[in-house]
C-alpha cells in the first residue's frame, strides 16, 4: 500500500515559507533600526539638541526595554525551534515581531515626536487587529494544549 507523503511535503513547504517570511520581517525590523539610529545621532549631535534628548529619557528607557525584549524573544524563538516546539515558537515569533516594530516606532517618536504619535497610533491599531486574529492560538498555547502535532510527539 503506497504511503501518501503529499501532506508532509505541503507542511514542510508551509513551514519553510513561514520561516522565510519571518527572517524577512526580522531583517526589515533590523534595517529600519539601522536607518533610524544614525538619524537619531545626526539630529541630536549639537549641544543644545542633547539637552532636548535628555528630556526624552522616558522614551529612551522604553526603547531600551522593548529592544531587550525583542532580542530575548528572538533568542527564545530560536531555542523553541531547536527543541521542535513549533506551535510555541509561532507565538513567541509574533511577540518578537511586535517588540521589534514597537522599538522602531519608539525610535521614530524620539526623532520626530508628532510623527511618532501618528505612527504609534497606526502600530497600535495593527497590533489590536493581529492580537484579535490570533487570540485563540495564544490561549491554546498558554493553556498548554499546543497543537495536536506536538501532543502526539513522543517524549525526547
Image (spheres, rainbow, N blue to C red):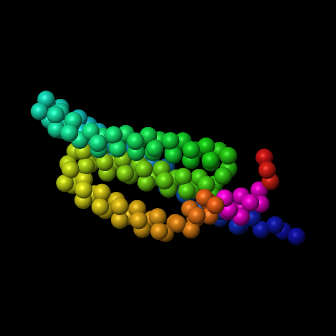
- Percent coordinates x, y for residue 61 in the rendering: 33, 40
Position of residue 46 relative to residue 103, above or below, is above
Q: Quadrant of the N terminus?
A: bottom right
Q: Position of residue 71 (x, y in %)?
A: 47, 41
Find the magenta span and give its range: 144-153
User: What residue is shown at x 22% (from left), y 45% (from top)?
Assistant: 111
- Residue under the point 71% across and 64% down: 148
* In the foreground, 60 or 40: 60
Q: Main structural element of the magenta stretch: helix, strand or loop? A: loop
Image location (x, y in percent) of residue 13: 62, 60
Q: Is residue 147 magenta?
A: yes
| Residue 30 within the segment the image draws in magenta | no
In the rendered image, the vertical position of residue 142 relative to residue 58, given as above or below: below
State whether residue 28 appears in this view: no
> What residue appears at the point 70 percent right and 67 percent down from the top-left corner?
7
Task: Name the spot of residue 126 as percent of width and height, x first.
Answer: 38, 64
Question: Is 12 displayed left or right of 62 in the figure?
Answer: right
Residue 120 in the image: above or below residue 55: below
Q: Residue furthest top?
A: 47
Amino acid at each position: 500500500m503506497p504511503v501518501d507523503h503529499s501532506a508532509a511535503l505541503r507542511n514542510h513547504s508551509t513551514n519553510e515559507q513561514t520561516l522565510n517570511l519571518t527572517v524577512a520581517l526580522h531583517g526589515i525590523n533590523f534595517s529600519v533600526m539601522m536607518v533610524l539610529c544614525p538619524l537619531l545621532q545626526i539630529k541630536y549631535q549639537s549641544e543644545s539638541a542633547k539637552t532636548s534628548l535628555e528630556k526624552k529619557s522616558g522614551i529612551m528607557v522604553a526603547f531600551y526595554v522593548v529592544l531587550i525584549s525583542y532580542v530575548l524573544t528572538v533568542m527564545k524563538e530560536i531555542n523553541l525551534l531547536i527543541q521542535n516546539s513549533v506551535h510555541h515558537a509561532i507565538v513567541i515569533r509574533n511577540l518578537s515581531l511586535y517588540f521589534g516594530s514597537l522599538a522602531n516606532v519608539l525610535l521614530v517618536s524620539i526623532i520626530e515626536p508628532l510623527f511618532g504619535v501618528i505612527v504609534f497610533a497606526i502600530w497600535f491599531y495593527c497590533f489590536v487587529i493581529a492580537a484579535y486574529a490570533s487570540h485563540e492560538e495564544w490561549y491554546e498555547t498558554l493553556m498548554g494544549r499546543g497543537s495536536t502535532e506536538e501532543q502526539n510527539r513522543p517524549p525526547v
